[in-house]
Amino acid sequence: MKKLISIEEGLEITEKELRELHREYLNPGLVTTMGLVKFDRLYKEASGCIIKDSQGQEYIDFLGGYGALNLGHNPPEVLKALEKVKNLPNILQASLGVAPAVLAHNLAQITPGDLKRTFFCNSGAEAVEGALKLARIATKKEKIIYCEGSFHGKTFGALSVTGREKYKLPFQPLVPNCHPVPFGDAESLEQALKSGDAAAFIVECIQGEGGIIVPPQGYLKRVRELCTRYNTLLIIDEIQTGLGRTGKMFACEYEDVVPDIMCLAKSLGGGVMPIGAYITTEKIHNSAYGGMDKAILHTSTFGGNNLACSAGIAALEFILKNNLPLEAEKKGQYLLSKLKGLQEMYPIIKEVRGKGLMIGLELKGSNNTLLNRLSGGTLENLAHEYFASLVAGQLLNEYHIITAYTLNNPNVIRIEPPLTIEYEQMDKLVWALEDIFQKNKSFIKMAIANLKNVL
């Protein structure tokens, strides 16, 4: 009989053993990629914004689980909530759960407008899948319009409305009748909507993986007007921007926009439990799933389990009690001003943008023909796909600060710390970046310093 590894044994494995397990049983290509900038460390402990590795070294987390850790790592309030419900039946389909009922009620109280009916699932991609299906069944139309540069997930339907070809081409043909328009361009959207055959337009208030792209002021309000005029449902993806991240509870509130369907996930589980959801109006839900014959057309085995929803209840309570949206607004203004100060000093920084604590730092690459030729094209590849990862690698290895780049624009460093981040910790990030750019004033110098690892 082959030997299984127990939890106790797993907690004692070394970094080398961890890499070997991942390489053998998970994703060897990812192990190699993570190893290029030494992202393959073994972490043993996390609390708030601080993570400790196997050597006891502390790191400040400015990545925040891609927006999943608005409350920080292992928030005690959420863990205590899970302890309170540990004796409830967690998954019992032949019943009506307590926690999902309470969480759905609470979401209806804090979401804008007349959003009321919630469907619970396990992730953001699943929330998008459910929203797309809802739009089609409710409108009896097929066409879905989405934005270039968007990211809504990597499951089949979500990928079909995601705007980067790198992730889509290997899986084509995808879901048919999905059509892109430029993000932030209301005129192009109107042209796509004029035929009146679109079930929905799905959009992010700020494109996260697109590189933290903020649309022009008034864009979302115009989008709402157009969707109403052409009888198209507006799906707003607040998976990353929601629950306080941008300085409002929901980013669509900056323009007082009420979507027909809103997708949530990430921090809804308090950074502890996986949970996603979409919330819609009573009218739309009834037209899609009203009545006994249609009530179970879209379901999820683990969706709405008591543990995940209890984490959600505690997470919302924590966000409201500590006014995390206001914290994100104030801290975001502070950090943005500091980073824009660096931009004025270092031309290697192309742009700083964002809202609240959802910030992107875009860097300039290089077109140095000689060095590209000498490196066999490696420098050119770095410039287009991994430049921000070089900076992220230096932040991690030399300054013990965790960041990463955005998926659709690898030259953008994403800065999305827990909303509980302290000003002193933000100052440390700014100081570290300044030190890096002072020592490496061009892409070429930074790339050469990292070329040995990459090769």
Image (spheres, rainbow, N blue to C red):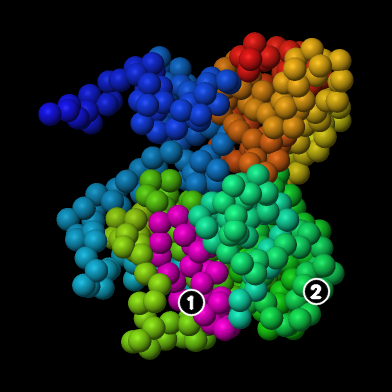
Q: Is 377 within the magenta?
A: no
Tell me the residue at 78%/80% (across/down). Answer: 194
Looking at the image, residue 351 sits to the left or right of residue 112; the answer is right
Q: Residue 343 placed where, x, y %?
A: 82, 31
> Which element type, helix, strand or loop, lies under badge 2?
helix
Q: Where 240 falls versus 221 (above or below)?
A: above
Would you name the residue on which mark 1 appears? 116
> Which element type, helix, strand or loop, lies under badge 1?
strand
Q: Quadrant of the C terminus?
A: top right
Residue 30 appears in the picture as rendered: yes
Image: magenta residue range = 114-140
Q: Is 115 within the magenta?
A: yes
Q: Residue 400 placed where, x, y %?
A: 55, 21
The kind of residue on which mark 2 rests is Glu
Tell me the residue at 55%/46% (across/down). Answer: 67
Q: Quadrant of residue 235?
A: bottom right
Residue toward you, 415 or 431: 415
* Disc assigned to residue 190: 2
